[in-house]
Amino acid sequence: MRTSIAALFASLGLLVSGSAMANSSDYKCYLETTQGVQVSFFKWNDKKATLRQSKLLASQVSVSNKINQKAYVKKVVECVKLEQEFQSPAAKKYDAVTLR
């Protein structure tokens, strides 16, 4: 009996976590940082993507071309879903040479 109850709770946990993951997407943001401009990648819940984007300002991100180095975000220029294209010509140009 205890085993079946534990299995039920475990399967419910997987359903909940699976549905939460289904509502999240990969995003890319063109950022001005203390180390220069860069494209950074994030995985956000779709409903909270705008909130997450607004919280990037003054946060630390990894510098894309250097190992173990962080930079502070000075300005969030643009964020889009990973499969979408940036609107800014500068962001498009930088995104074209950014490794995934």
Image (cartoon, rainbow, N blue to C red):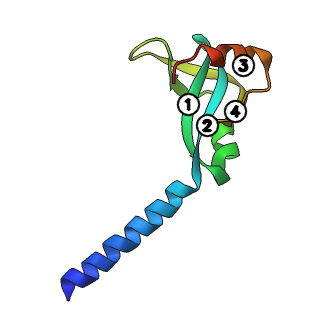
Q: Secondary structure at mark 2?
A: strand
The answer to whether 4 is drawn above or below residue 68 in the figure is below
Horizontal and vertical percent position of residue 43: 54, 41
Q: Which residue is mark 3?
A: 92
What is the crowding at mark 3: few (fewer than 14 residues within 10 Å), some, or many (at least 20)? Answer: some
Identify which residue, 71 or 1, lies in the foreground.
1
- Labels 2 & 1 near each other (Cβ < 8 A): yes
Residue under the image location 52 percent in, 59 percent down = 20
What is the crowding at mark 1: few (fewer than 14 residues within 10 Å), some, or many (at least 20)? Answer: some
Q: Earlier in the sequence, mark 1 or mark 3?
A: 1
- Labels 2 & 4 near each other (Cβ < 8 A): yes
Would residue 7 appear left or right of 76 to someone viewing this image? Answer: left
Q: Which residue is mark 4?
A: 79
Residue under the image location 43 percent in, 15 percent down = 69
Q: Earlier in the sequence, mark 2 or mark 3?
A: 2
The answer to whether 66 is drawn above or below residue 24 in the figure is above
Q: Amino acid at mark 1?
A: Phe
Q: Earlier in the sequence, mark 4 or mark 1?
A: 1
Horizontal and vertical percent position of residue 92: 72, 19
Identify which residue, 22 or 55, lies in the foreground.
22
The answer to whether 17 is drawn above or below residue 73 in the figure is below
Q: Which residue is mark 1?
A: 41
Q: Amino acid at mark 3?
A: Lys
The CA distance from mark 2 to mark 1 is 6 Å
Q: Secondary structure at mark 4?
A: strand
* Numbered tag placed on residue 27 in the rendering: 2
